[in-house]
Amino acid sequence: MAGKLYLVPTPIGNLGDISRRAAEILEGADFIAAEDTRVTVKLLNHLELKKPMTAYHRHNCETAGAAILRRLQGGESCALVTDAGTPAISDPGEDLVALCAAGGVEVEAIPGPCALTVALSVSGLPTGRFAFEGFLPLNKKNRRARLDALADETRTMIFYEAPHKLRATLDDLADALGPDRRLAVCRELTKLHEEVLRTTIGEAQARYAAQEPRGEFVLVAAGRPAQEEAPDGDGALARAEELRRAGLPLKQAAAQAAEEFGVKRRELYNQMLERERD
Ligand code: SAM
């Protein structure tokens, strides 16, 4: 019978955040797969546990993943931990979960600390709908494309960032979303020097131009405000019909109204065509 992979969240700064259930799973598993065994050994020492460990990280995930899968298929149980937070959220755990799912091994997730939910909940921004963006792509072209796609995003957006890239990311967010967009800069969450700065992108740029960013950051940006909700489809249709009544051919009326209201020409044309057929 196949064993089981347990996804065990670990504290993102405060060791007191390890749950009793997480500790029990670590104790009961046959072995632990850890992103960095030197980090995890500190947690095990805190819990007074000793366990066989194997490394599973970005640079060995293919070979280590296959080896862990074989052990699980052989009936062992494995607790997967990463350096901090919930495995598989912006860390290599996601590949191991996919491998196990494809290989017929059961995966059980234990709830626990995760930087994104801590940051979102404390941000003061709308939490009803949100888009987790993780780390922005490093590749210039992909980064540009991602940021362009976010310009119209109306949900609250959450980004992870390393301190040495924070300034560049704030600049890019200012370009894509505008400097006046509300932003919560959540730093060193659950740690001694935890700080939540509820500000705007522009003010955050000014702050970190004057001060070296240090520590771990999550950025939570407000979505595009509702009043900027363009394009106005109803307005465009009404205008196109007005132009039709004034004698313009269908195609030309659609093109002109689409231009004036910033809507898609083809969609407006089809909409008018349907109306005129009725
Ligand atoms: N799996 C983790 C989780 O559940 O949050 C995230 C791993 S990702 C490799 C690491 C990123 O999470 C950091 O670069 C930072 O953006 C964020 N992060 C982790 N701990 C944090 C903390 N205590 N305060 C603020 N951000 C944190």
Image (spheres, grey):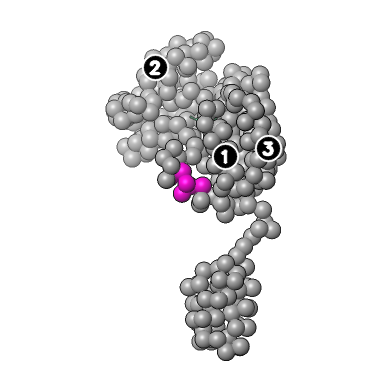
For label 2, the SS is strand
Image location of residue 220, percent across then percent down: 62, 39
Determine the CA span between mark 2 and mark 1. Answer: 41 Å
Question: Residue 203 versus residue 105: which sits nearer the camera?
Answer: 203
Q: Is residue 145 magenta?
A: yes
What residue lies at 59% left-to-right and 79% top-to-bottom?
240
What residue lies at 64% left-to-right and 40% top-to-bottom?
201
Vertical position of residue 223 compared to residue 23: above or below: below
Front disc: 2 or 3: 3
Q: Which residue is mark 3?
A: 203
Q: How many marks?
A: 3
Question: Residue 246 versus residue 38: which sits nearer the camera?
Answer: 246
Q: Amino acid at mark 2?
A: Met
Determine the CA span between mark 2 and mark 3. Answer: 45 Å
Write down the region rendered in magenta.
Answer: 142-147
**Mark 1 nearby-residue class (10 Å; few <14, some 14–19, many ≥20):** some
Q: Is residue 271 left or right of residue 16?
A: left
Q: Is mark 2 within 8 Å of ligand 1?
A: no
Q: Amino acid at mark 1?
A: Asp
In the drawing, what numbered circle is on residue 53? 2
What residue lies at 59% left-to-right and 26% top-to-bottom?
213
What residue lies at 54% left-to-right and 37% top-to-bottom?
169
Q: Amino acid at mark 3?
A: Glu
Instruction: For residue 108, say whether it is visible.
Output: no
Determine the CA span between mark 3 and mark 1. Answer: 11 Å
Determine contact: label 3, label 1, CB under 8 Å. Answer: no
Q: Which residue is mark 1?
A: 171
Q: Is mark 1 within 8 Å of ligand 1?
A: no
Q: Is residue 130 magenta?
A: no
Does label 3 or label 1 sit earlier along the sequence? 1
